[in-house]
Image (cartoon, rainbow, N blue to C red):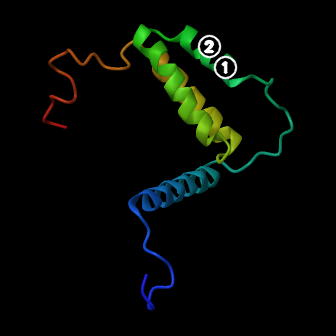
Amino acid sequence: MNASTPHPELNPYQKDAIGKAAHLRREVASFHQDWPRLNSADLLPPITWSELERQLASLSATAAGAAMVHDLVSATRKQATFKPSELVMREILCIASAVMDETFPPDLSCSDSEADDQTI
């Protein structure tokens, strides 16, 4: 730190953390713009993260989808505190849709996978 710089330089970890926080803030602001808060007091029944995970795994169309549920729910849970509840619910619905889709994840052994398609 020199006299012209009042604060020390940020290390790569700090820069990454600031970038992630800024991305999360933009995501929430965009969500609020698209989906303003409703004045409704009707709440969903309470459910635990473990119960949610169990049900999503049970609904999974494939063993691979069921195996991904824990990591997907864990990632959603970690950020849930910082997001509006409706956005968290939307992410849970996306997880459910993905794991219930028999074609998700794509079969990587297939020669015509998107990774091999150069026309995209």
Residue 29 x, y percent position in the rendering = 60, 56
Foreground residue, 27 or 14?
A: 14
Q: Is residue 3 above or below residue 91?
A: below
Q: Is residue 21 above or below residue 82?
A: below
How crowded pointer 1 is (Cα within 10 Å; few <14, some 14-19, many 20+) is rated as few
Q: Label 1's element?
A: helix
Residue that label 1 marks: 50
- Asked which quadrant contains residue 116, the reply is top left
State the quadrant of the C terminus.
Answer: top left
Q: Amino acid at mark 1?
A: Ser
Residue found 62% across the figure and 34% down from its top: 77
Residue 5 x, y percent position in the rendering = 45, 85
Q: Amino acid at mark 2?
A: Arg
Q: How many labels, in total?
A: 2
- Asked which quadrant contains residue 115, the reply is top left
Give the label on residue 54, or none: 2
Inter-mark Cα distance, 2 to 1: 6 Å
Residue found 68% across the figure and 39% down from its top: 86
Q: Does 15 sit left or right of 52 as displayed? A: left
- Residue 62 appears in view: no
Foreground residue, 58 or 118?
A: 58
Give the label on residue 115, or none: none
- Asked which quadrant contains residue 53, the reply is top right
Q: Does 39 sit left or right of 101 as displayed? A: right
The answer to whether the residue labelled 2 contacts the one labelled 1, judged by CB atoms less than 8 Å apart, is: yes
How crowded pointer 2 is (Cα within 10 Å; few <14, some 14-19, many 20+) is rated as some
Residue 21 x, y percent position in the rendering = 54, 56
Q: Does 117 sit left or right of 72 as displayed? A: left
- Residue 102 appears in view: yes
